[in-house]
Image: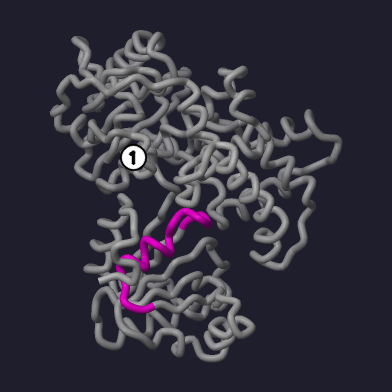
Amino acid sequence: MGLIKGKYKSRIIDKKIKEMMRSFGAVCVEGPKWCGKTWASLNQVNSVSYIADPINNFQNRRMAELSPELVLEGEYPRLIDEWQEVPQIWDAVRFVVDKDGQKGKFILTGSSTPKRKGILHSGAGRIGRIRMNSMSLFEMGDSSGQVRLIDLFNNELKPISTGEVKLTQLINYTVRGGWPGSMELNIEDAARIPYQYLQATVEDDIYRMDGIKRDVNKVNALLRSLARNESTIVSNQTIRKDILSYNDDQIDIDTITDYLDIFERLFLIDNQPAYNPSLRSSRRVLKSPKRHFVDPSLAVAALEATPKMLYNDLNTFGFIFEALCEHDLKIYAESHNGMLYHFRDERGNEIDAVIELPDGRWGAFEIKLGANQIDAAAGELLKMKEVFEKEGSAPDVLCVICGMSNMAYKRPDGVYVVPITALRD
């Protein structure tokens, strides 16, 4: 099965798509542009309709607008690519699925979330949703994959040499990002992709979302502010102050909120929610998320930073590196139906990344660029373990994810040390 058999580089999400197709009549694979949604879906289907295809004056889209069920005709499983161009397709798919209850009929892909106008039914029980991301280091071929995330939770990691990693390599990974189209490019050519990505978003995609023309200067100012605050916890009010400190143009909170909503619907940002192991705690919902672009390369592009600039500003690169690690940790966690969070309490205690598995086990992860920071990070994790032990909810895993380290191992104090360039799902 699959229209691109023999040409496809497998993705971690492939297994999840197959699982969802066994449970639902249709599966919606959504996520940022250029992350590989269409190729991953083509690998699973026998026919396809490209709604955004410009051939014959956008014939497919016109056909779908006139009668959505026409673009659904074809051999199952059938892919409807960029379905959000004609939101009525959603209800048409739900109706066809309801006719016989057959599983795995359709895959819908979308690089933006339409407003509910034109959609009558949520699709609950008929259409399953999957969020896809850009590629992890393991998928890009830059992580050896010697350590599986699940090995840490199962206490199965054995000490292993993972090889030397240079700072310049890590910088290049963040500048390039996880875009499939960048895999074979040199760093100079790859760096143009995220820059063009942002430019296309500002000049075209935002307007196409709802037909409202927004202030390009303010949009760019917000993107730069988000980049300056990458991997941090900041309020919209703080972002406004940051923008005003760098720009003369006035911007109010309502405008920032509106733009951030558009960014979310375009899958441009992917914030990391707060965590507390107690399901009844208000901290899970009241604490601020950690700010992230959907791919670390977008933060680099918004800052207009070059590899040399990042090399000379390791403080800034530290936040970008953290974003890279948390980007990958989320992909690996979700492959096990887990979730990625961060933790911070009112006393200033914090954990860079928290992974919670469906069975309730959870792990605390600190992210450090250099091997010389491992001891301090392990100490922080052990301190946090004591805090949670008093509440009866100690983490099952303590781990330092590092950049420039050549070993994966478990310390005598029980803290794992794993290079991000050796990790996989």
Q: Which amino acid does label 1 sit on?
A: Phe
Say above or below: 36 vs 378. below
* Magenta highlight range: 31-47
Q: Where is residue 244 in the image (x, y as percent from the top left)?
A: 79, 33
Say above or below: 387 vs 242. above
Q: How did the renderer colour the structure?
A: one colour
- What residue lies at 56% left-to-right and 67% top-to-bottom? 114
Q: Which of 150 and 2 is in front in this view?
A: 2
Say above or below: 147 vs 27. above
The question of residue 207 being in magenta is answered with no
Say above or below: 41 vs 310. below
- What residue lies at 67% left-to-right and 51% top-to-bottom? 259
In the rendered view of the protein, which quadrant contains the N terminus?
Answer: bottom left
- What residue lies at 67% left-to-right and 31% top-to-bottom? 238
- What residue lies at 53% left-to-right and 63% top-to-bottom? 113
Q: Is mark 1 on a helix, strand or loop?
A: helix
Relative to 27, 85 lies left or right: right
